[in-house]
Image (tube, rainbow, N blue to C red):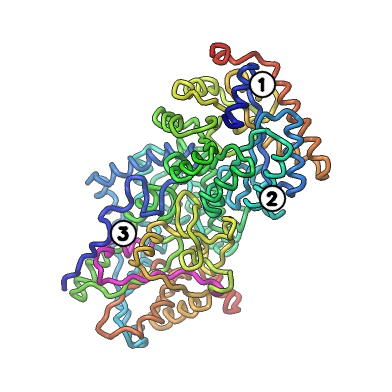
């Protein structure tokens, strides 16, 4: 079946200033502007270079374990009684999540640019581990900024990063989570900008990060597209992914954006509930604002101060979201829904028991939506969910939640 | 001529450089903060940078982060900061520059902000995270209201960026003396003078230098080649030395007096003699 192309979306986003419509851009201090311009130039050059692309794909294959399977979740499909459910198994990537796709791409770029040191922020620790991993592989010293609260709830990943030779810098300011880690990483970068490469883990931040991270992650969607065409002989009806900053969702969605019949659902973290004020649903519960270098939806109070967020999934516990997702929301291309801590926890257990796969708590938010959505669809319909990471890192949190001492 | 231009013109005649202290509005509370502003003027401040506190001050070091946190805890908001400026303006004609991050201003509404800020007597605005590329809309509103939109330059800025800031900037150019966040340093960078001279080749705007200036001898050195010295973290650290709010204004005035005295003792900047 041929897909109809969506002509209402501009072919080229972002524009040359990094704007996705009114979103995106570069809101940083002057000290960082030259570094971002240098990075943009280096990336655009690398992107056009077949040698760079070959090297990127060689490492994705031989080191990160790509291509990841597109797995038909037969038992879950049968149990829910609706659409055929496929899981894109990013949980099988080296280091346990899709984050490695982006870190491989950026470390190759850092090497080309002659940078001598890597820094990164991390929430759940997955991006931190993926960064520490490539830093070890390519021989870079590496500092990872992580909020104090996240260090406590993701102690396993902290230990992994240390084993990989990275220094984990514990951030104690604000809400002690991902946004504060990003503030501190930006302070480090502004101080050491000439020699240090800032390896951002999601499709947020100033231009060119949202575009670059999306491009590196879109290997997910390109593979899934090829795989579903060969398995089903057609494009899917639905794509489902969880959204924190948005890198796994943009990675899956991007290669399908112009296929207008493919519906896309982004699942935000509703924490204790959207009405509770304790959540991390930036698009559903936020207003347009500027944080960490770009304009996008932002959880903030009426005076423009950034609000504390909550999600049981540390990787979703962030008040902002990638600017391209805000833009695509405005164009009506992606539908946004949310799942609470409770729904995610139930979904994690359901997938574990029915398919023998323990998803990361982040990905479990997408599973929760699949559980709601699939039964409402016809059996002839096809759905792909991005299983962005595995749940090993969350066993402490899940144990606490279930009242089990490990 | 607005208050910023008038002040620089008057100082130029005297062969003096401006001393511009920075304090965070509402630190530790709104009432004390207003008294500190008056004390700064009394101590000899030629203009004042008033920080609008923000929850995520990513360009700031530990000292100004603490000031921001105290101010937010004390209930400081942009509307309250503007109200404080209105009260200050009743008794003072010192040029006043709001200094902060873009989001609180964006959230307030750009047009409304510029109108209200000009009405209460703000003279200029500087957003650390708003480079000229993103400033178009705010600049248009600001120009209509006669509010100066001030931009930063940094050690990493090349000729192209200096030209851009020279074209878009109003009031003065703020040169960030270090690659790094705000905060007091033991020593000043070595190449400051040549950097400032480089900026002058592109722009006739006055050039102020800030970040890391903490001692009278630092301020004096800046005064020998630049048009203004901005002192923030060192002043806030000085105010943190006393826990009694009632003592803070006195301390602020004394601190500024010491810096200003040191600056007056240096020779007239050579470019100003020539001009």
Q: Residue at x 68, y 48 (%)?
A: B83
Examine the rendered structure and indicate whether residue B238 appears above or below residue A217. above
Does A98 lie within the magenta span?
Answer: no
2 and 3 marks in contact (CB < 8 Å): no
On the image, the x and y values in percent for residue A347 come to 45, 79
Does A269 lie within the magenta span?
Answer: yes
Asked if residue A25 shows in the view, the reply is yes
Chain under numbered label 1: B
Furthest residue in direction left, as rendered: A1
Q: Disc 3 marks which residue?
A: A218
**Disc sitting over residue B220 in the figure:** 1
Quarter of the image with the N terminus of chain A is bottom left
Q: Earlier in the sequence, mark 1 or mark 2?
A: 2
On the image, the x and y values in percent for residue A334 come to 35, 68
1 and 2 marks in contact (CB < 8 Å): no
3 or 1: mark nearer the eye:
1
Q: Which contiguous range is marked in magenta?
A: A248-273
Examine the rendered structure and indicate whether residue A57 appears above or below residue A368. above
**Disc sitting over residue A56 in the figure:** none
Q: Disc 2 marks which residue?
A: B71
Question: Is label 2 in a helix, a strand or a loop?
Answer: helix
Asked if residue B175 shows in the view, the reply is no
Near-viewer residue (A333 or A47): A333
């Amino acid at each position: 079946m041929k897909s109809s192309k969506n002509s209402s979306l501009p072919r080229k986003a972002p524009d040359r200033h990094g704007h996705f419509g009114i979103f995106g851009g570069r809101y940083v201090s002057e000290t960082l502007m030259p570094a971002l311009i240098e990075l943009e130039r280096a990336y655009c050059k690398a992107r056009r270079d077949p040698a760079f692309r070959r090297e990127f794909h060689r490492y994705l294959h031989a080191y990160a374990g790509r291509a990841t399977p597109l797995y038909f979740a037969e038992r879950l499909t049968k149990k829910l009684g609706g659409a055929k459910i496929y899981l894109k198994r990013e949980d099988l990537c080296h280091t346990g999540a899709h984050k490695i796709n982006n870190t491989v791409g950026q470390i190759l770029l850092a090497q080309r640019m002659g940078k001598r040191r890597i820094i990164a922020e991390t929430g759940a620790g997955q991006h931190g581990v993926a960064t520490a991993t490539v830093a070890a592989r390519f021989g870079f010293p590496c500092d990872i900024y992580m909020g104090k609260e996240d260090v406590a709830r993701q102690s396993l990943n902290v230990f992994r990063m240390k084993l990989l030779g990275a220094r984990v810098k514990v951030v104690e300011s604000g809400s002690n989570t991902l946004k504060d880690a990003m503030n501190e990483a930006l302070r480090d970068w502004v101080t050491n900008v000439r020699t240090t490469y800032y390896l951002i883990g999601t499709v947020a931040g100033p231009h060119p990060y949202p575009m670059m991270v999306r491009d590196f992650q879109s290997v997910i969607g390109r593979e899934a597209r090829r795989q579903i065409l060969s398995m089903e002989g057609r494009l899917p009806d639905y794509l489902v992914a969880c959204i924190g900053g948005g890198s796994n969702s943009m990675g899956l969605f991007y290669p399908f954006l112009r296929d207008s019949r493919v519906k896309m659902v982004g699942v935000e973290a509703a924490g204790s509930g959207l009405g509770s004020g304790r959540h991390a649903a930036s698009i559903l519960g936020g207003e347009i604002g500027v944080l960490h270098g770009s304009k996008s939806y932002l959880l903030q109070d009426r005076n423009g101060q950034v609000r504390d967020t909550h999600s049981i999934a540390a990787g979703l516990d962030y008040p902002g979201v990638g600017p391209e997702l805000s833009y695509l929301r405005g164009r009506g291309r992606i539908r946004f829904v949310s799942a609470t801590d409770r729904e995610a926890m139930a979904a994690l257990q359901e997938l574990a028991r029915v398919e023998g796969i323990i998803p990361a708590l982040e990905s479990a938010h997408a599973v929760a939506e699949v559980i709601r959505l699939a039964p409402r669809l016809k059996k002839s319909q096809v759905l792909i969910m991005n299983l962005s990471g595995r749940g090993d890192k969350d066993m402490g949190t899940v144990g606490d939640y279930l009242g089990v001492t490990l | 001529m607005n208050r910023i231009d008038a002040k620089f013109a008057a100082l130029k005649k005297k062969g003096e450089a401006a001393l511009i202290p920075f304090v965070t509005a509402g630190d530790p509370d709104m009432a004390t903060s207003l008294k500190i502003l008056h004390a700064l003027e009394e101590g000899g401040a030629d203009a004042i940078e008033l920080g609008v506190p923000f929850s995520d001050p990513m360009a700031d070091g530990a000292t100004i982060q603490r000031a921001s946190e105290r101010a937010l805890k004390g209930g400081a908001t942009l509307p309250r900061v503007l109200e404080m400026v209105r009260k200050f303006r009743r008794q003072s004609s010192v040029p006043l520059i709001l200094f902060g991050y873009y989001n609180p201003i964006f959230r307030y509404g750009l047009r409304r902000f510029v109108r209200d800020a000009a009405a209460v007597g703000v003279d200029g605005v500087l957003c650390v995270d708003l480079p000229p590329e993103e400033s178009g809309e705010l600049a248009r509103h600001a120009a209509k209201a006669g509010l100066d939109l001030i931009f930063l330059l940094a050690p990493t800025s090349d000729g192209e960026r200096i030209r851009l800031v020279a074209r878009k900037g109003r009031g003065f150019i703020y040169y960030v003396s270090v690659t790094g966040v705000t905060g007091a340093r033991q020593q000043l960078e070595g190449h400051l003078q040549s950097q400032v001279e480089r900026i002058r080749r592109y722009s006739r705007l006055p050039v102020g230098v800030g970040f890391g200036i903490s001692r009278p001898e630092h301020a004096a050195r800046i005064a020998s080649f630049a048009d203004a010295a901005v002192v923030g973290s060192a002043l806030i650290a000085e105010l943190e030395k006393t826990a009694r709010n009632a003592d803070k204004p006195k301390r602020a005035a004394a601190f500024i007096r010491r810096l200003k005295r040191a600056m007056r003792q240096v020779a007239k900047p050579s470019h100003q003699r020539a001009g």
